[in-house]
Image (tube, rainbow, N blue to C red):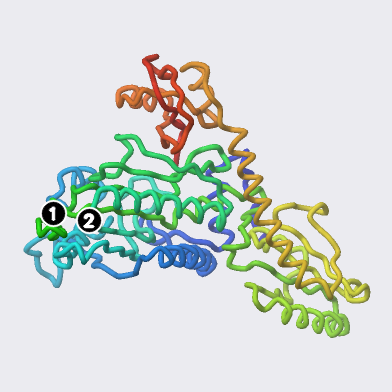
Amino acid sequence: MAEEKLPTRSENYSEWYNQIVLRSGMADYAPVRGCMVVRPYGWSLWENIQKALDERFKNTGHENAAFPLFIPMSFFEKEKEHVEGFSPELAVVTHGGGEKLEEPLVVRPTSETVIGHMYAKWIKSYRDLPILINQWANVVRWEMRTRLFLRTLEFYWQEGHTAHASSEEAEEETLRILGLYADFAENEGAVPVIPGLKSESEKFAGAVRSYSIEAMMGDTKALQAGTSHFLGQNFAKAFDIRYLDINNQLQYAWTTSWGLSTRFVGAIIMTHGDDKGLILPPRLAPVQVVIVPIYRNDDERSTVMPVVERICGDLKSLRLKVDERTEMTPGFKFNDWEMRGVPLRIEIGPKDVEKKSVIFARRDIPGKEGKTSVAQNEVASQVESMLATIQRSLYEKAMAFRDANIHQPRDYDNLKEIVINGWAYAFWCGSGECEAMIKDETKATARCIPLNQPAESGKCVYCGKPAKQRTYFAKAY
């Protein structure tokens, strides 16, 4: 039976997204509500994300470690704001080995508490600082409304945790990681992001300041794609992370935490995908190039396959796939790889062999417009160039879309119109009351206060009082 046609983004964006994730082999629903099974194709994309980030972390002096999945409930109760922020999302284990536990254990929603406990043991002197640790892990947050990759009960991420001898050094670390995330998102994922400060109501529970990178999805909603938190001395005081400074005085450390999760897979899907399926950026794509040999019989196969094998040898440095499925037509294969978002398809048939050429088909430019004939002896050099062009084109297209859908509102009524299908970049006085009213009346939240915005002043879009900075307001995932 033929598979139902993929819903278009304009018809039903939510269902389009769900179907793409399922049909492309990225993930599937788990038997536990709100959880997902990440399939090999989706996990391969996540592995490429891990590799790109891990290299950046290590280049900035960070080391990987692993901490327990189970955290004593009493740890969360030590930091008042932290436990209040996370209580509704906690999964708690009360029994183990057939007996009731003396103390309930929380299934890790984030690791500030257990890592704070360990840092208190390890840090004794200023010579022990800074400590720069990252872990790759799964976490559990009991979400009520879930969606594959974007918001699931269990998800995968990296979480960095650092401790420093001064406030200035910790703040510098927080912003360094924010910049690292932005660099990764734009240069590897081809996802344009805006780095900025979160409002007080949107910051991480227990942080002094939270920063994020915000990305616009294909339906103009915002997605928080990564966060970096300056924790001040809140967790240091809660867990007694103290050290003797150079003057032999006992001081509390200054800490940070930061994370980027499998939610970024959703960001890639919704930033670049079209009505035919995924479009993956070449630098992260599990398969960068797929070769589709085209033949009707054994004679044609014996003509085509030696050329395919020779080209495979020329492209061995790339993530390459040859589709030799005999039970599928070339047209079916083309559609299948388009659904999976492979950046570049190479078609080789008997006529191409005769002409000593191949056909390149770009995933980011559908139809005939994306096809070019390339000489066989130029394939290796042309593929590298083409992948770089596709990577750049995806970023530029996403940037143009984002910029076309960000507007500066004339007044509050205009903001209400803008956030129906876009982002409003508006003056805001900083009042939590104004922020709450905007959210209540429009469903748009303060996404971030962008860093390094020009010095200017105006009137708060909601209350009209003096304001010295602009903020992005948008509906969000």
Q: Earlier in the sequence, mark 1 or mark 2?
A: 2
Residue 7 lies, with reference to residue 425, above or below; the image says below
Q: Mark 2 points at which residue?
A: 165
Q: Nearer the viewer, residue 329 or 171?
A: 171
Please, what secondary structure does the residue beneath circle 2 have? Answer: loop
Residue 376 lies, with reference to residue 389, above or below; the image says below
Q: Are marks 1 and 2 in contact (CB under 8 Å)?
A: yes
Q: Which of 275 and 398 is in front in this view?
A: 398
| For residue 279, side relative to residue 15 (left or right) | right
The x and y percentages for residue 119 are 19, 63
| For residue 150, side relative to residue 381 (left or right) | left
Where on the picture, by quarter, is residue 381?
Answer: bottom right
Residue placed furthest toward the front: 247
Residue placed furthest toward the top: 464
The x and y percentages for residue 40 are 51, 69
Q: What residue type is labelled 2?
A: Ala
Which of the numbered marks, if any, corresponds to residue 251?
1
The x and y percentages for residue 443 are 42, 29
| Residue under the image location 48 percent in, 40 percent down | 222
Which of the numbered marks, if any, corresponds to residue 108?
none
Residue placed furthest toward the left: 102
Where on the picture, by quarter, is residue 383?
Answer: bottom right
Give the total of numbered labels.
Answer: 2
